[in-house]
Image (cartoon, rainbow, N blue to C red):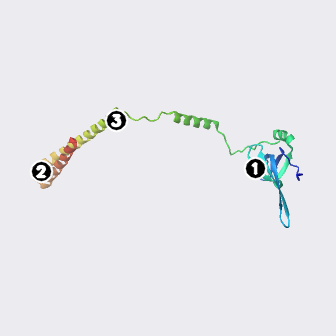
Amino acid sequence: MTQKHDITFGDLVHVDGYDDRPFFVDSWTEETRHEPDVIYEEVWFDITCAWTGEYHMAELDDITRICGADQADDYLMYNAAPPINPEIKLDIGKLISEGFERGVLEMRKPERKPTKRELSNQEAERRKQARKEREEQIDNLLDIRNWNVRKYVETSERAYRMKVEEIDEELAKLAAEGRR
């Protein structure tokens, strides 16, 4: 079978829609389709980007030959260079510091669980604080109770007597809590 185009294996080509990216021709497929009124002939190329190694397929109508396989290396060396994208900025210092921070975090020892002794000490401290707060509350209630007793003795008003009874009930509750 004779080929109907001048592009062959290893040639360097441009493809419409891919700017100036050069591609190597790996192979091609020729297809002939017969219909009652017409015959279609299509040629598809398997191509690889010379810069990235990406595989693509392209139709013969979309391909322009740059040079033959024997001149491809020279062409790439002198005429074609990958485009530099100004939006891609590589900050080496930032990459190093982020890597260092990640490494430090990975190296950090996991938080250890407290020992039974430490837990016991924490519980004892919590109870001591609760006892202290209860004692302060009792002292405050006794001061208020004593003031109400003095006022009741001076005035004989029932409101002072009722306040003393309320405080006595509250003191009884606090004393019961302290026994637990």
* Residue on which disc 2 sits: 152
In front of the other: label 3 or label 2? 3
Under circle 3, the secondary element is: helix
Q: In this orientation, which residue lies closer to the viewer: 19 or 151?
A: 19
Label 2 near label 3: C-beta < 8 Å?
A: no
**In which quadrant will I find the C terminus?**
top left
Q: In this orientation, which residue lies closer to the viewer: 151 or 128?
A: 128
Q: In this orientation, which residue lies closer to the viewer: 92 or 114?
A: 114
In front of the other: label 3 or label 1? 1
Task: Give me the C-alpha separation between circle 3 and circle 1.
Answer: 66 Å
- On the image, the x and y values in percent for residue 157 come to 12, 54
Give, as a three-letter code, the residue at label 1: His
Give the answer, above or below, for where 116 lies relative to 43: above
Under circle 1, the secondary element is: strand
Give, as a three-letter code, the residue at label 3: Leu
* Residue on which disc 1 sits: 56
* Residue on which disc 3 sits: 119
- On the image, the x and y values in percent for residue 26 come to 80, 46
